[in-house]
Amino acid sequence: MDNNEIDQLITAMAEKGREASRKLAALSTSIKNDILLATAEQLKTERDFIRAENEKDLVAGREKGLSPAMLDRLELSDKVIASMIQGLEEIAALSDPVGKVDDMKRRPSGITVGRMRVPLGVVGMIYESRPNVTIDAAALCLKAGNGILLRGGSEAIHSNLALAGLLQKVLEAHAVPKEAVQVIPVTDRYGVNAMLAQEAFVDVIIPRGGEGLIRFVTENSSIPVLKHYKGVCHLYIDESGDIDKGVRIAVNSKTQRPGVCNALEGMLVHKSIADRFLPVAAKELIAAGVELLGCEQSCALVPEIKPAADSDWGTEFLELKMVVKVVDDMDAAMAYIAQHGSQHTEVIVTESYANSQRFLREVDASAVMINASTRFNDGGQFGLGAEIGISTTKLHAYGPMGLEELTTKKFIVYGEGEVRQ
């Protein structure tokens, strides 16, 4: 398929998606929930087929030499499928934001003005590996009344098409146009360029993947982009921090799933607690397979910590590797975070209420936490249902994007014949 044919195909898909989105926007909550629950049942029924299609992608990925982290993201294991089913059920149970009205106020002119939540329209999703995103994103968009045009990575094409086909069968069974959920069947990279030119039919682009993909999308899109470049997350151990809490949080944040964006990449330790905390934390982290790269002071306290290169500070490793730095005080920690963080997740371990509140107020990130693992920055963990992504920019969402973040507000006006004087 040449570029002209790809343009024509994707334009036609985007236009049909726009038409379908108008039908979705008018669906009742009960019908949307029925579709979500029926999709969950279909996943159970067609589990073997989904696993077989996914295996095609896994075989091809191994032959291409994909990294273990990429293969982990690509696999639709029973656990991942169960998570998708749970996500569908949780989204069905969530309150529907569409049509909610608030801020109704009577104006001196006699009119009454309020705001109503409405769908965004058509969401374009560009993502790598993780085929479970196909279901998670489609489910959230459907509940929020949006059509979705999905462009997954070539490494997951069989999985993505199988999942979208399953959802389309459910949509048609409920008399909803199947074009409400579409996966672009083109693996050619030009497909991304063609999608980013659909400003007439697509309202927002949400990229999920590596920093290179997101920068490419941002630089080449004629459509507004909700972006999240990378997850450089930090843990600051305050002078009053509880050592056991800090060690437990550090190990979980780094090792539970090191290849994801909310995994820990840097640990900052107040100088007054460093000699007590670092040897204990380093022992646990190293035992878990973590390679530690540190500053001169941290290396002196723990000989197993290797000297960090200048390029290591602020790096998103996405593996069992992280940096460690001893800092003079909380101001130094916050200055480091401002310089090297990515506005994703920042944590303080402290028993000081005053310090915890300063950290919450002054640190700029989509999630700032006190005495909790970075791994909690997740739509499901925050009660949003399956998230469509984590935005680290502030327009129009900041942090995990759930149902409300997939809607906007329009003004509504009630009058009785008033005219402007």
Image: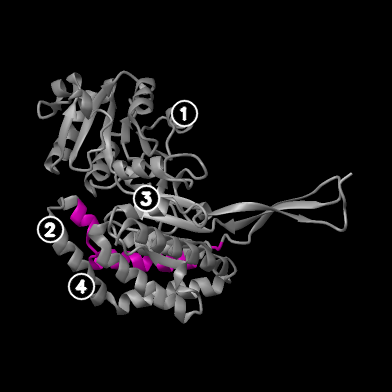
Amino acid at dot 4: Ala
Label 1 neighbour load within 10 Å: few <14, some 14-19, many 20+:
few
Which residue has dot 4 on it?
52
Q: In this view, does 213 lie to the left or right of 411?
A: left
Q: Is mark 4 on a helix, strand or loop?
A: helix
- Please tell me which residue lies in front, 143 or 367: 143
In-image side of 70 versus 138 (left or right): left
Residue occupied by mark 1: 362
Q: Residues within 10 Å of mark 2 (few under 14, many from 20)?
A: few
Per the image, the residue denoted by label 3 is 193
Q: How far apart are marks 4 and 3 (CA)?
A: 30 Å
Q: Main secondary structure of the magenta part?
A: helix
Q: Which of marks 3 and 1 is in front?
A: 3
Which residue is drawn at the image coordinates 59% and 61% (left, top)? 98
Q: What stretch is highlighted in magenta?
A: 70-96
Report x, y in % for residue 352: 41, 29
Distance from Cα at disc 1 to Cα at disc 4:
49 Å
Residue 301, position as x, y percentages in the image: 15, 23
Q: Foreground residue, 399 or 393?
A: 393
**Between tags 4 and 3, which lies in front?**
3
Q: In this view, does 237 lie above or below 271?
A: below
Mark 4 vs mark 3: which is more N-terminal? 4
